[in-house]
Each structure stands twice: as structure tokens, then as C-alpha cells.
Image (cartoon, grey):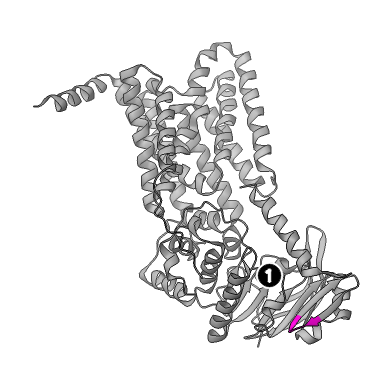
Amino acid sequence: MNMTTDMAMNIITDLFAYEFMTNAFIAAGIVAVMSGLTGYFLVMRGQTFAGHALSHIGFAGATGAGLIGLAPLWGLVGFTVAAGVVMGLLSDRLSNRDIAIGVVLSLALGFGLLFLHYYTAFATQATALLFGNVLAVDRAMIATLAALGLLTLLGLGAIMRPLIFASLQPELAEAKGVPLRFVSTAFLAIVALAVAACAQIVGVLLVFTLMVGPPAAAQRIVTGLWSGLALSAALALTEAWLGIIIAFHTDWPVSFCIALLSALGYFVALSWPVPAQHAHSH
Amino acid sequence: MNAVELDRVSLRIGGRTVLSDVSFAVRTGEFIGVLGPNGAGKTTLMRAILGLLAPASGTVRVFGRAPERGDPAIGYLPQLRTVQPDLRVRGFDFIASSLHGHRWGLPSHSADDRDAIEATLDAVSARDLAARPLSDMSGGERQRLLLAQALIGSPKLLLLDEPLISLDARHQEVAIDVVRKVCRERGITVLFSAHELNQLLGTLDRVLYLGNKQAVLGTVDEVVTAPVLSRLYGTEIDVVRAGGHIFVMSRGCDVERLDHGHEHDHGHGHEHHH
């Protein structure tokens, strides 16, 4: 065996010598795929900011759950899904959406802080919530993430066709009988599940790294629907796994490494040579 | 049979009456230019015909039946407002998304769907748009793509809501020519809303002029007159004919141009949200 493959083998056996590393890879894999797929539609619909806000609202839910003795994950899921549904139902009326969402997400972070203030024992977990802690994932969490992932995929699969139609051409979709409000509400509920799962890996502050970076890059590089979805999921998966490997060998925080790769992927995609096809028609 | 028939119809949005006690009948195969100031109810009228807005009173009939949401006999081209400028979706996928787009489940299209998409693109000479992303298309190309989409499934009635907005003069001519050619060939009834009457003069059969909660349908000579338009605009209007063109003036200003400038401002303000 030559030296490079030998080294590569060592790197890989080193990685999986610890159970927490295996767990981290499995959990990050599940979450990356669901984030990459869900995020693709978030980017297509121009609702990335809403996804960001959902994660902040989830922070209040997680700390609130801790305060009353529930598992933070369920507080996270409960709050994000409820907020997603409310956002979906109000979407027509929030004409100045960015500002309204911004105000609500600040308020949610504020509440998160308040709950932490009253439940000091929980404070040590605050960093994990905000920035993620994939290395602390256990088997039970993997099962939960897998269930959330499955639910997300089934939901997306069920609404995908009208979701795409409603995202690209809302007026026409409405005229053709697509229930716009139901579709957007169902979609935001699905996003909420993905956000809750994503926050377990990279934290509520960094869900953009898996939910927006990879799909945005994928949409720059390919224009097909299925190829875009596949590339988005593949990029998210690569960035998540590579992030863990880099973190393992450098001792940098995993979330930092993933955030770095996500940004790198996006900016490389931005400068991706687009075939010059600006032929002006008649 | 009449393609579209309104009998004493009032349309209301959020407590505001947009059209009040309006009656008219569009015959099958007619090309109708829908004109009138901003906010006169052009889009609202189309939404009523599509079955998206129930009349507060009166009856709307489309080919003799009550309007039905998702009616395959109607092709619709909404105002180009919400298409995101940087959307990197191919023309083909864009049109494909609208085929059976109301069904649940995963998107897929059959060989028949594929043929239908290619045929409709051919009808507006836009086959090359199938493979190109929307973000790379000019305004004229996008509009042509939307027109191709509206024609899919052989509709008998075409509702075109301001299809000329955001096109330069040359592309406007081309768009009108394409619509005229396809619709004459297929005997499609067209409601074509626009700001400028003059470009449509050679194409339209009759004019539907909206304003002041009223609507008047008739030939250009019947409708575009000082007394009728003064009533619809609610102000003193002069109609000046010169060199085959018609200018609708209010206190010495061309009202169509005034409207146009306003609409552009609006369009830009809207884009900033995206």
C-alpha cells in the first residue's frame, strides 16, 4: 500500500474510532440532506429570511421548554412549527414582511434570553443551542432526527408539485385552483421541522449554513429542478461532513468549519462561469 | 354563443366597489382591448372571469356557464409582477410547473406534456427559450414564454393582463403580432388589457373601456369619444385624432402617458421587496 492511501485510511479509521464521531456523521448526514432539499424551495421562494427567523423563534421555544422541564428539542419543534403556521396564514397581510419578521425574531431572541435568565442551570446549554453541538449527539437524538427527516421528506413530496407552481407563478397557480395559503402554510411548517433539526447540528444562529448556502450555490450552478435538488443536498452533505473532519483535525468548532465551507461554496458558485447566452431576441 | 357575458355585475374588493352594475357581452372570437386608468378594475374584472372573485351582485357567464376556478378553457397571463429577476429556472421547467400544477405529489411530465410544451413554444417562435434560465431572458422573451404558457391546452379564451408592460416599443409590436396571429388562427377570444390604445388599433375588434366603476364595450369610434371618456374618467376629456393615432387628453396632457409613468414607478417600488 502506498503512503497516501495509507494516510487516508488512517484519517478515516481515526475518525470512526470514537462513537461520538460516528454519531456526528450520521446526524449531520440526515440533517444536511433534509436541509439541502427544504432549503432549495426556501431559496426558490425568496423566503430565506423567514427560515432564519424561525430558528430564532425556536431558540425561545428551546429555552422555554428547558424552563418548564421539557426536552429543548421539543420546545424548538413546537415553537418553530407554530410560528411557521402563523407566518403562512398571515403571509398575505404582512406586506412589509422583512421588517415584521425582523421584529418578531428579535423579540423571540429576547424571550430566549429571559428564559435563560430564570433557568440558570440551562445556561451551559445555551451555546450549544445557539451554535450547535453535533459532537454531543446520541443514538436517541439520531432516531429523532431520522423521524423528523422522514416527516420533512414525506411532506415535501406531497406538496412539491403545487409548491413549485405557487412559488414560480402565484397568480396563475391561484387561477388554476392551487390553494395558495394552504401550500405556503404547509411549506413553512415543513421548513420549521427542518430548522429544528438543523439547529441541533449547527445551532439556531447558523441554520443558514446548511439551509441557504448549499441550495443558493446549487441554483447558481445548475438550472434543472432535480439536478438542483440533488446538488443542493450533495453540497450540504459534503460541507457538513467535511466540516466535521476539519474540526476533528484542527480542534476548531464544527459549526465554524461548516459555516466556512458553506460560505466558500456559495462564493465559488457566484463566480461560476455562466454560459454566455445573452442573445437578444426579436 | 358569447364568450364572456356580464349582466348587471358589481365587483367589490375589501368593501371598495370596483365595478358597479356593469353589463356587456364579448362574442366568441373577438379581440377586445381592455383599457382604462389605473385602478379602474382591469385585473379585478379578469379575476371575476377566472372565478377567483365572486360578484357582489349580478351574474358572470363564461361560454354560457358560471366561471369556474381552474377552467381549462381559459388561458391566463397575469401581470408580470412576482417573477423574481434572478430566478435560474429553465423556460421548459417554468412552463412544466404549470401543467397539472394543482395536483399533489411529485412533479413529473409525460411525453405528451413535453410535446405540448414544445408545440406551444413553437407557436410563439420561442423554442430556444426552453433550455434557458429565466434570469437570462429579456423582458420580451419572458413575456413570450408566459404567452406560450397561456396558450397551452388549447384555451378558447385568453385573458392577457397588461402583457406589454416592461416591454420597449419594438417588443410591444412583436408581442401584439404574435397574439393576433395565434388567436386568429385558432379562433381564440382575447381580452387584452393595455395602457396604450394606439398600438392595438390595427388589431382589436372592439374596446372595453373601464373607469369610474363603469364599463363601456363598443367599437373604437363608439367608445373613444369625448363624452364617453369624460364620463369614465370623471373629468373633462378631449379625444384628438391625428395621423391615424388617437390621443386621449385631459387638460392638455396625454392621460395614457401619465398612467404609464405612474405604473413604472409602482413597478420599481415593488421590485425592491424581492
The magenta span reads B241-245
Q: Residue at the spot x=63%, y=70% of the render?
A: B169
Asked if residue A198 is among those painted magenta in the image, a careful observer would answer no
Q: Main secondary structure of the magenta part?
A: strand
Label 1, secondary structure: give it.
Answer: helix
Q: Is residue B224 visible?
A: no
The residue most toward the bottom is B1
Q: Callout 1 environment at 10 Å: few (<14), some (14 to 19), or many (20+)? A: some
Question: Could you tell me if residue A200 is visible in this image?
Answer: yes
Chain designation of label 1: B
Q: Disc 1 marks which residue? A: B46
Figure quadrant of residue B214: bottom right
Of all residues shown, which one is farthest toward the right? B236
Q: Is residue A79 left or right of residue B22?
A: left
Three-letter code, disc 1: Met
Spot occupied by residue A254 in the image (x, y as percentages of width and height): 39, 23
User: Measuring 54% from the left and 11% from the top, which residue is drawn there?
Assistant: A121
Which quarter of the rendered picture does the N terminus of chain B lie within? bottom right
